[in-house]
Amino acid sequence: MTARLTPFKAGARDILGLPLLLGLAATTQADIDPMARMTAVTQDISEATNGRLNLSGYINGHYMTHDGLPDLVNKHLNHALWQIREASLFADVVITDSLLFSTELEMSYSFTDKEHSGRKDSFEALLNYYYFDFDVSNALGWDTDEVGALHIRAGRVLVPFLSYNENKPNFKQNLMSQPFTAWQLAPVNNVAIDFQQFGWTDLGAILNWNYAFDEAGLFDVKFSVINGLGTKSAVLDNNTVQLNSPGMMKPTVRPRDGLVNARSDWDEFSDVNDEPALVLKASFVPAAIPLNIGVSWYQGAWDKEGDHDLTMVGVHLDYLQRNWNIKGEYVEADVEQQAGINVVSAMGPAMINVSTGDYTMSSWYLEGAYVPFRYGSDNEKFLKTIIRLDEVDTNDKALFTPFDRERLTLGLEWNFMHNIRLRYEWQRHKIHDFDNAPGPYIAAGGEEEVTMNMISLIAHF
């Protein structure tokens, strides 16, 4: 269960309510620029504190519908969702010239009733990350041109794995929906129907060294020691759902939906076991072209006894131009796990719920975006088209899992005002090996193809 900041509940509807979402969309007059005004406020705060307190933030809200998902007892997945999916306030506090404290307050509000959304609370809030960053090279007076720059971060940090996690705000992304690599594998985001935290964070420390090689480019290495992903259960992907099949029998099944449930809550400081996990990420940005390429590695025990390991290896690529970009990731995870274990105590099909033993998860995505049209005095307003292909398999040994699927996503974005944009996304999912789907899954309305439509409003300052 995710802990919540209950004091923020007061006045939540006024702060994050639908009037704000609709109001942002309606402010198209030339003399109204809400994000510029918010930016001016944060600049005033920074100046008043002599640059010691620096604030920024963003908000995104959406309307989303699905077709083809199974109906659950406590969640109606095909029902339309109205949400302020995330409203974040980022704060950087400069303590000394070499020491920085950084944090993010995340908030979410659902306008959909609890019966259909499955959420326990309409309004929820948490601190996604909170850490100190110490600039070792500055404190020791190093010549960074000669030896590079060295930083140490400690606290609850964003785990440096692949590219998406460290660039998770949706105004930095082409699409509102996250790729499978950042959902089922690297547990960056969860499904929109839930609110836990948007970002894979963990308690630990990061050693970050980067060096600019003259005309070659920038080389960056991050080595992290964290508590790591894990669960107290006998299986790693221990999430369960209860299918709302016709009749009296409502079977409980394991969807094998990846690693999101294996990450710790934002205010959890203990580890599942006494063995830390290790993370290594190395990336390179050539000086000649706007390309970021890198490789990531994760290793850690996930069970209470520390006997079973989770190992992940991934690569990322970002090619960013002003009017077009290409992004992609590939990740593979090997899970050590005992076979023949059924952790589901409720009634459900054993062939779906029993553990398979050691298995492999894999996912990839490739995404392209193009801006065919810019307008306005400074060409800041634009239209953008987006396409993404991605695929995931959360257990290569399982007879059936709905998260062995491929997906096509098409998007259109309109940046109609300073730092405010409207997005439309359409998705088509196709589930693999659907012939092996259990009868209760189909009876609950689960189909081989799933479609999604979503309209989002995104603003940042």
Image (cartoon, grey):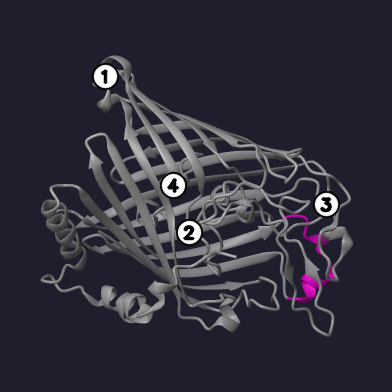
Question: In front here: 295 or 56?
Answer: 56
Q: Main secondary structure of the magenta part?
A: helix
Q: CA distance from mark 4 to mark 1?
A: 40 Å
The answer to whether residue 81 is above or below residue 361 is: below
Counting residues from the start of the chain, the first of labels 3 and 2 encountered is 3
- Name the element at disc 2: strand
| Residue 415 position within the rendered picture, expressed as x and y whole percent measured from the top left | 28, 61
Provide the residue designation for mark 4.
368
The Cα atoms of the two marked residues, 3 and 1, are separated by 53 Å
Q: CA distance from mark 3 to mark 2?
A: 35 Å
Q: Which residues are magenta?
A: 432-444
User: Label 2 neighbourhood size at 10 Å, few (<14), some (14-19), many (20+)?
Assistant: some
Tag 4: amino acid = Gly
Amino acid type indicated by mark 2: Leu
Residue corresponding to mark 2: 410
What residue is drawn where x is 60% and y is 54%?
260
Mark 2 vs mark 1, CA separation in Å? 48 Å
Question: What residue type is disc 1 on?
Answer: Trp
What residue is disc 1 on?
142
